[in-house]
Each structure stands twice: as C-alpha cells, then as structure tokens.
Image: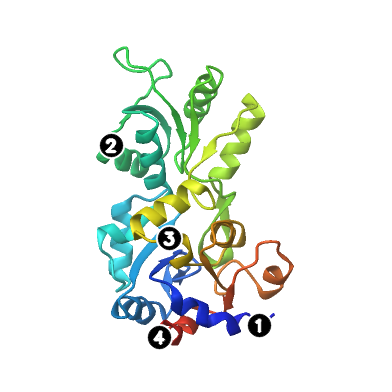
Amino acid sequence: MDKKKNLPLFSQCSAVVCDLDGTLYLDGVPFPDSAPFLNAVLASGRRLFYFTNNTSRSRSSYLHRLERFGFPAAEEMLITAADCTFQYLRQQQLCPEIYLIGNRELQRDFHNHGFRCLTKPEGDEGNPPRALVLGFDTELDYEKIKTGYQLLMQDIPYIATHADLLCPMNHGAFIPDAGCFIELFAAASGRRPLVMGKPSRFAAQTISDRAQSAYERIAFIGDRLYTDIRMAERFNMIGVLVLSGETSEKMAADSPDQAKIVVNGIGDLINALG
C-alpha cells in the first residue's frame, strides 16, 4: 500500500488540522518532527489547528501541554469535541442549564462558556436541565449514573461529546472512554446520544467554520481510522493517516476507512507543503 504518491494532494490545502495523541506525540513525548512540521505549516501561509475528541482535559490543560512541547499554541488553534458541543447546545437553545456527566476540568470549560452544570435531576432553584451532556468523565460515580438514567427516562435531549470506546495511555495501554459510558446508558435506558466529536458532521462543520475554508481545502491528519480518517473521507477533506499511533499498515489496508494519503509519521509531510 503506497499512498505517499498522493502527497501532491496535500500541497493543495489552505488549512491543516492535526489530531494530537498518536499524531504529534505519543506516551506524553512529542515526535522529533512535530514542531518543525507545525512551524513549517505556518511559514507556508496556511492556517493551523488541532482537534481532539478527548474531553477529560480542559482547553487550558491542552494549551499548556502544546506550549510545553514547543508547538504553536494560540487559543483559536485548538478545537475540541466540547467546542462542538457548546456550539450545538447554543444553536438548539439547550442552555444555560444542563446536567453534565464530566469531570471537574470539563465542568470548568462549560462554566467558562456560560453554562450552568446542575447537580440534581430536577434542577436547581426551579430551573431543570435542558439537556443531558455525556463527556469523558474520569470521576464517574454511581450518583451520576443514577441521575443520568433518571433524566434519560424523562426523554430529555441527550448529547455526547464523543463516542471513542478507548483512550490511549502510556506504553500502549488503554482506559475506557466515553463510548463505553454510552453503552452503559444504552443498556439501562435504550437511548443513544447525538454525538458531537469526530467523525460527526458537527465536528466537520466546526472545523470548516474555524478554518473559514471549504472541506476540500482542509487537510486532516490523524492516526485513528474510525474517527480521524472516517470524518476526513466522509466530508471530502484531504485525509492523511500517520502510522505513528494506533493504526498499523495492515489495519489501514484492511479497513473500509481509506485515507487519501498514508505516511509513516508527521515528518513525511514537511516537504509536501511546497
């Protein structure tokens, strides 16, 4: 499988969007070519963005990590699945009161964007939640599970920030992600959420709006087939698969989600910027 021959497609983009873990760093260590590549994107006159589905960290936490790695890290460069969720909830007027199943970092992000995260299924001070929002809650407990179930049985609008089943950790290990929580609530209530993150149309639209570019002019670089590459191909972005993270060459060859370009790592793209 030689898709490096398609590298000239990459030079046609006006904006570059990078997944984070597995694409620019792994096990908390940046790849040597990541900072040179990111700086080369900006030097070429293209716009640069980062996108992550992981909502267990706050925006400020991500920006701090990018800065620590020596990556370009302006506020507007970072897009998360939570950003897609903020936008959707406002558009649908499902605010400001919500019930959020998320850790303290995610609660802080929602608060900073004008939402009130309620603590009871009936709401606080006579204002019931207008939506149930499920994130990657690394502080999940039974009280939240019970409250979430009670709200689902009331037919409340139900939104998930993303649906990844597993989150990569250090040394090739994984932990359960929000997709596992979705399955838990589906088993209890029979309901499934509207998902905001990759590979949804909400994520693609948020990227296009932020980049101020048509999909065909956006290159999306990632290491995961069923989120990064599926979204890129579904919306006709220039999908670039890097084999530096989750996906092996065999997995890529056998998958129904086919990237336009496949490279070993982010450094293979530097010369293709033109």
Q: Are marks 3 and 2 in contact (CB under 8 Å)?
A: no
Q: Amino acid at mark 3?
A: Ala
Give residue 204's position: percent from left, percent from top.
47, 53
Q: Residues within 10 Å of mark 1 (few under 14, many from 20)?
A: few
Q: Badge 3 local density, few (<14 within 10 Å), some, or many (20+)?
A: some
The residue where tag 1 is placed is: 2
Q: Few, some or many C-alpha atoms within 10 Å of disc 2 (few <14, some 14-19, many ≥20)?
A: few
**Three-letter code, disc 4:** Gly
**Mark 2 or mark 4: which is in front?**
4
Verify CB contact (< 8 Å) between mark 1 and mark 2. Answer: no
Q: Quadrant of the N terminus?
A: bottom right
Residues at discs 3 and 1 in contact (Cβ within 8 Å): no
- Residue 173 placed where, x, y %? 58, 61
Q: Secondary structure at mark 3?
A: loop
Q: Earlier in the sequence, mark 4 or mark 3?
A: 3
Q: Which residue is mark 2?
A: 111
- Quarter of the figure with residue 67: bottom left
What is the tally of numbered marks visible in this picture?
A: 4
Which of label 1 and label 2 is nearer to you?
Answer: 1
- Between 41 and 23, which is closer to the camera in this rendering? 41
Please say whether residue 221 is visible from this viewpoint: yes
Label 4 secondary element: loop
Q: Identify the residue under disc 4.
A: 274
Q: Is residue 74 left or right of residue 23?
A: left
Residue 264, x across and y down, in percent: 56, 80
Does residue 218 appear anywhere in the picture?
A: no
Q: Residue at x 35, y 60 (%)?
A: 211
Tell me the residue that label 3 is attached to.
214
